[in-house]
Image (cartoon, rainbow, N blue to C red):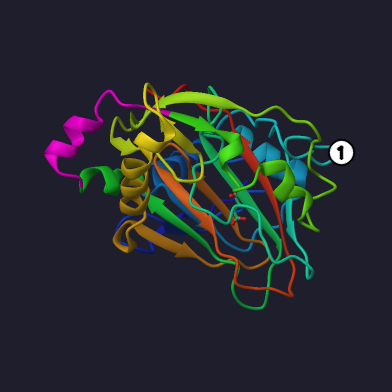
Amino acid sequence: MATQSIEVRPVAGALGAEVSGIDVSQPLSAQQFAALHGAFLDHQVICIRGQMLTPTQQIAFARQFGEPDIYPFIKGLPETPEVIEILKTEKDTVNFGGGWHSDTSYLERPALGSMLYALETPTAGGDTMFASMYSAYDALSDGMKRMLSGLIGVNSSAQGYRGGRAKKMKELDGMKDKYIENSEVSVAEHPIVRAHPQTGRKGLYVSRGHTERFKGMTAAESKPLIDFLADHAVRPEFTCRMRWDPGTLIFWDNRCTQHFAVNDYHGERRRMHRITLVGDRPV
Ligand code: SIN
């Protein structure tokens, strides 16, 4: 068991921290778990560099924080179905996750968090951006907060890629063999403002990527406010940007953040392993 002390260094004003002094391939001591979990709740996104993780070790790390889920649209690795491979090849011009979203917000119990581990990274680019939905909510006027209270979003997995998720996935050289044919469209209704089950803080829970409309309204009626909220949610001052190297592991909290995989490295490969953890029903 590692005995180094953990250091946590914030990377931006709103969210994100670099964590050092830990080898996550080994079981965490109670003290290490408390430090890491505390950093995760405080900073919403934690980045741990220089890790050597097999898929089995990544799952063992993930299990200390929750229950690894099975992602409904992409086949997992044969021996470890909880781990999906996210690959953009030299041939691809579209990437997976290249729009602001919170993972699986279209499920009844959306992902608590996601753990993404980098295996191959481009020479430059391929960063992931994150935005704090606490900061986005806090910055709204009292009038807007009142208006949003009680509003329910209808989130759909079909919304993710314009023209349909299945069609888009099949166009991706790195992902087309992994797509689960005929997977059902998932739709779930969740509050537009959700309270984090562990911190109690309120955050916006709406994205252009997944939120189709508000419950009781048409898509056309909903669109102007969804567009406003989606743009507001990712204002630069609510974001941070994380750079990847092989061996970087980033664990983000989907209950209070959105993320965006930047697609600026055409002609190069980027290969990652992702695990999502089962979350609560948002309230
Ligand atoms: C995702 O949306 O989970 C993928 C993020 C990334 O590849 O940076």
| Camera-side residue of 236 and 150 | 150
For the C terminus, the image quarter is: top left
What is the crowding at mark 1: few (fewer than 14 residues within 10 Å), some, or many (at least 20)? few
Local SS, label 1 = loop
**Which residue does the numbered mark 1 point to in the structure image?**
78
**Residue sticking out furthest to the bottom:** 123
Query: Image quadrant of residue 56?
Result: top right
Q: On the picture, is 175 further left or further right than 36?
A: right
Q: Is residue 144 a member of the stretch shown in magenta?
A: yes
Question: In the picture provided, is 133 more to the left or to the right than 77?
Answer: left
Where in the figure is residue 4, as x and y percent of width and height? 52, 56
Q: Is residue 29 visible?
A: no
Magenta stretch holds residue 152? yes
Instruction: Give, as a three-letter code, the residue at label 1.
Output: Pro
Magenta-drawn segment: 140-153
Comparing 226 with 243, the one in front is 226
Image coords of residue 264 (percent x, y): 60, 72
Which residue ends up furthest to the left in the rendered image? 142
Q: Is residue 2 visible?
A: yes
Closer to us: 109 or 13: 109
**Quadrant of the image occupied by residue 130:** bottom left
- Taking 264 as reference, is 9 left or right? left
Residue appearing at x 75%, y 68% in the figure: 269
